[in-house]
Amino acid sequence: MLGGRNPGLGLAILRVVTGLIFVMHGGPKLAGGIEGTAAFLGSLGIPFSGIMAWGIALAETLGGACLIAGLLVTPLALLLAAHMLAGIFLVHLPNGFYVVGPGRGGYEFNLLLIAALLTIVLAGSGIATIKSRFVRDVEVVLD
C-alpha cells in the first residue's frame, strides 16, 4: 500500500506498541506485585531484590509510558534493552529459544523486544513524539 514511503509512521507504531508491552508488564508489578517480583529476584541470587524490584517495575512502567509519548526515547530504549538482555542471561537462556511451558519461557520474546528497542534507537522515534526542551534524545549515526 504505502510501499515503505512512511517510515516515520512505522517507527511510531513500533515505539508505541513496544512501550505498551512494557507498561502492561510493569504496571501489575507496581499495583501489588512488588513482593512477588522481589522474591523471584531473590531466588535468582540478585542482591537488594526489594530495591531492584521497584527499579524494574518503575523502569518498565514509566519507561514504557515515555516510549508511548515519545519522551526520552533513546536513553530509555537503551535501558530497557539492557533490562531485557539481563532477563535473557539471568532467566530465559537455560530454557532455550522457545517457550516450553508455563513459567518456562524461552528468550525469543526478550530478543524481539531488544531488536525493537535497538531499531528505535538506530532509526529514530518516528512521528508524534514529545520533545523535551531540556533533554534531547541522542541521535545515533553510523557511517
Image (cartoon, rainbow, N blue to C red):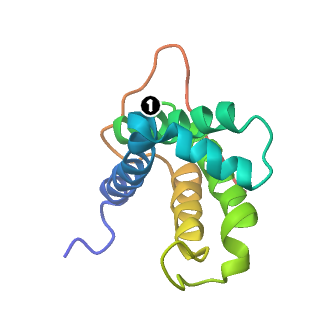
Q: Is residue 136 above or below residue 24?
A: above
Q: What kind of element bears circle 1? A: loop
Q: Residue at x 49, y 48 (%)?
A: 124
- Classify mark 1: residues with Cα within 10 Å, few (<14), some (14-19) or many (20+): many
**In the rendering, at what x and y percent does residue 91 appear?**
68, 65
Q: Is residue 24 above or below residue 69?
A: below
Q: Residue at x 34, y 55 (%)?
A: 17
Q: Which residue in the structure is indicated by mark 1? A: 71
| Quadrant of the drawing holding the N terminus | bottom left
Q: Is residue 136 above or below residue 94?
A: above
- Residue 88: image quadrant is bottom right
Comparing 48 with 69, the one in front is: 48
| Quadrant of the drawing holding the C terminus | bottom right
Q: Residue at x 52, y 38 (%)?
A: 34
Please identify the residue farthest to the left as the structure is shown: 1
Comparing 14 with 6, the one in front is: 14
- Tell me the kind of residue under disc 1: Leu
**In the rendering, at what x and y percent does residue 114 appear?**
59, 61
Q: Residue at x 44, y 35 (%)?
A: 30
Q: Is residue 11 visible?
A: yes
Left or right: where 14 falls relative to 136: left
Left or right: where 91 falls relative to 8: right
**In the rendering, at what x and y percent does residue 57 appear?**
52, 38
